[in-house]
Image (cartoon, rainbow, N blue to C red):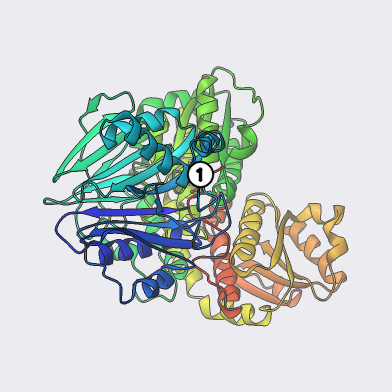
Amino acid sequence: MCGIVAYVGHREACPLVIKGLKRLEYRGYDSAGVALMNGQGLKIYKKKGKVVALEQELDGKEIHATIGMGHTRWATHGEPNDVNAHPHYSFHRKLAIIHNGIIENYAAIKQALLKKGHTFTSETDTEVLGQFIEDIWENNGGSLEEAVRLALQEGVGAYAIVIMSEADPTQLIAARKGSPLVIGVGDNEFFLASDATPIVEYTKDVIYLNDYEIAVIKNGELKVVTLDNTTTTPYVHKVELELEAIEKGGFDHFMLKEIFEQPRSIADSMRGRVQADAGTLQLGGLRDYLDKLAKSKRIVIVGCGTSWHAGLVAEYIFEELARIPVEVEYASEFRYRNPIIKEGDIVIAISQSGETADTLAAIELAKSKGATIFGVCNVVGSSIARATDAGAYTHAGPEIGVASTKAFTAQVTVLTLMALAAAKRKGTISDSLFRQLLAEMESIPAKVEKVLQAADKIKEIAYIFTYARNFIYLGRGLNFPVALEGALKLKEISYIHAEGYPAAEMKHGPIALIDEDMPVVVIATKDSSYEKVVSNIQEVKARKGRVIAITTEGDTHLPGMVDFTIEIPKVHEVLMPLVSVVPLQLLAYDIAVMRGRNVDQPRNLAKSVTVE
Ligand code: F6R
């Protein structure tokens, strides 16, 4: 959601910023803009639509500059159009601002500025903040840095901002609270971005700005101060991200690349943690907290979307193996109730991006009630990862496609390891089952690889259902959250209405929808619910529904009963979601491509949802 890129140094800023904005396209946006400073002063160019539209706008313009900043906007205040796009000039055009987040008290600030005779060109809270900073700067007689600090002390809400001023072509001022901002430190040059992806091809040295910090880059030097004007010494991290990890590598879409990466990403989630031969399992980030987890009276899992589905899978696994009661909550609901958190409760927050505003707020609430917070995040150094007491990274690598795929399987992998570790410590799992599950986990990448070999067959099935208007997904037990995830994948990228249900629940309502036009995807693997699921399939067939069944290799019964089957290898029931979700990801992808959808950047969606 909203992307920020800025540069000051010796390179051409405009192409660098544009390239950076393209790297951030995955975050989701509806307009884009840049501000550049050269002999012609501080110039802003912006356009509704994709970054290519902005490039066309820049065609033929004098864009030579060694300082510049760019933004991709995901509309919150005011519709997506050229005027509301960022950057915004201040009232006297002395500065330009880009902003990710929401200034909640912007209306009150705007009223005060209107009384002073200010006028506004856009409907955005960002323009109000820019004018407010300039107003303080003009009237206080201090530096721009001081004006930014004073303005942000008044501003309520979340933000990552970058400011350029006409007065100093060497200066960029940036600040953060609640929205991510990374500073790349090069040789006499600095990069600013919402995440490290636009930076890694130039430098691996990065600083993650903390909440309430302001970075002032001036004359080739960086200074970081807090909102109350205390200078801090930033820690320079080495990012491990490689360029090829953020490029398509020959695939048509990032989503397809990420689906096919799963054998590797699942293995990476286990790397250095599982030693099946020795029957050992270590999760470094949990070491000091494992006792607490094992002894916990209750686990509350919070997350959104796909991460919430991973939480539902974890609920089954923790309860089955570690015998700890688990509740799974949408972070957005949890944060606005008065949840009961007791001593000894553990909250596990799951987030791919590590920046989801609702999940972050749920963590803060749980913390304030005394819970110990574990994080399962993919993005290293993200806000959620830093807000938790302990946790384990998923190590899936960057996920660029908006629809989450490899992050889900990595989350389930890590959560399964956490449940296994807790069960072992608590003594609720036998040594032989523990060893068996570790060995089975090590075999999962090869089994996922096998499912991927069925890609052509899945494409043929997708072709038949390309123009379906609705879909139902059914599963039981651990495959119920997989049904939810399959339905979510389909609806978000193909825009087909799809519902996931526990298979047995169908007869309590959704069965009314079944007729010859209703495709029903049923996860009917050979597990403890198999016979029951077969009965549910019969109920669908009796009403002429068209069934696509995900079956276990060697199942000779279902092919004669259903319309289509997609076979997956036999897997221990507890680990089934890691494999059974993969054909559903491919089915959703193929249908969306055949319908001509923008698979990697579906309409209205953002990769990192930093507003509530
Ligand atoms: C679905 C999807 C979203 C995210 C959700 C949470 O494909 O990507 O539903 O899962 O927005 O995001 P994170 O995991 O980054 O907190």
Asked whether the viewer can see residue 311, the reply is yes
Give coordinates of residue 418: x percent, y percent.
Answer: 46, 38
Q: Please indicate whether residue 550 sits to the left or right of residue 285 in the image.
A: right
Going by the numbered disc 1, the residue's amino acid type is Asp
The foreground one among 553 and 51 is 51
Report which residue position mark 1 lands on: 125
- Tell me the element at label 1: helix
Give coordinates of residue 237: x percent, y percent.
Answer: 22, 42
Give coordinates of residue 355: x percent, y percent.
Answer: 45, 43
Name the residue: 43% across, 72% down: 53
Query: Is residue 108 depicted above or below 303 in this figure?
Result: above
The foreground one among 50 and 144 is 144
Name the residue: 56% across, 51% down: 306
The foreground one among 271 and 276 is 271
- Crowding at dot 1, Cα within 10 Å, few <14 / some 14-19 / many 20+, comes out as many
| Identity of the residue furthest to the left in this view | 187
Does the beta carbon of the residue at mark 1 sit less than 8 Å from ligand 1? Answer: no
Name the residue: 48% across, 62% down: 31
Name the residue: 65% across, 55% down: 484
Say which quadrant the C terminus sits in: top right
Query: Is residue 420 depicted above or below 596 in this figure?
Result: above
| Identity of the residue furthest to the front in this view | 117
